[in-house]
Amino acid sequence: MGTRLYVGNLDYSTTEAELAEFFEQVAEVVSVNIVTDQATGRSRGFGFVEMADQSAANQAIEQLNGKNLGGRTLNVSEARPRRDDER
């Protein structure tokens, strides 16, 4: 199983395809999910990228955290497990 990364401060118009392409410059991407508002379907400005392994995830954090995508400075870190009270 891959390693999930949290990606914050996304431009609201960023697509999952654009985010995948951005991360694939560094290493293999398994999946991408941009979180959207249930009522409006609009991006909430953050998402998750699953990298192939821990090494790929570490490379992505090191190389992409603080980089610019769509005019916004990305926050990239290892995703924390979701708590039951965060729904």
Image (spheres, rainbow, N blue to C red):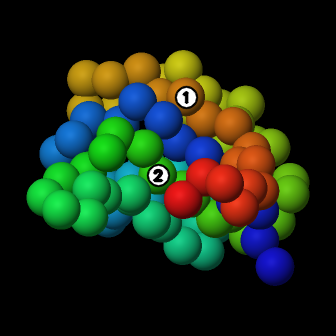
Which x, y percent locates residue 80?
A: 76, 48
**SS for callout 2:** strand
Q: Residues within 10 Å of mark 1 (few under 14, many from 20)?
A: some
Q: Pointer 2: what residue? A: 47
Q: Is 32 placed left or right of 58 in the picture?
A: left
Q: Nearer the viewer, residue 67 or 12?
A: 12
Type of the residue with mark 1: Asn
Q: Pointer 1: what residue? A: 75
- Examine the rendering and report whether any part of residue 26 can be seen: no
View extreme (left): residue: 40
Position of residue 50 relative to residue 86, above or below, is: below
View extreme (front): residue: 85
Q: Residues within 10 Å of mark 2 (few under 14, many from 20)?
A: many
Residue at screen point 67% across, 43% down? 60
Residue at screen point 45% across, 65% down? 33
**SS for callout 1:** strand
Q: What quarter of the picture does the C terminus occupy? A: bottom right
Q: CA distance from mark 2 to mark 1?
A: 10 Å
Which x, y percent locates residue 27?
A: 65, 58
Q: Is 58 placed left or right of 72 in the picture?
A: right
Residues at circles 2 and 1 in contact by the CB criterion of under 8 Å = no
Give me the disc on residue 25. Answer: none
Position of residue 19 relative to residue 12, above or below, is: below
Q: Is 3 placed left or right of 30 in the picture?
A: right
Type of the residue with mark 2: Gly
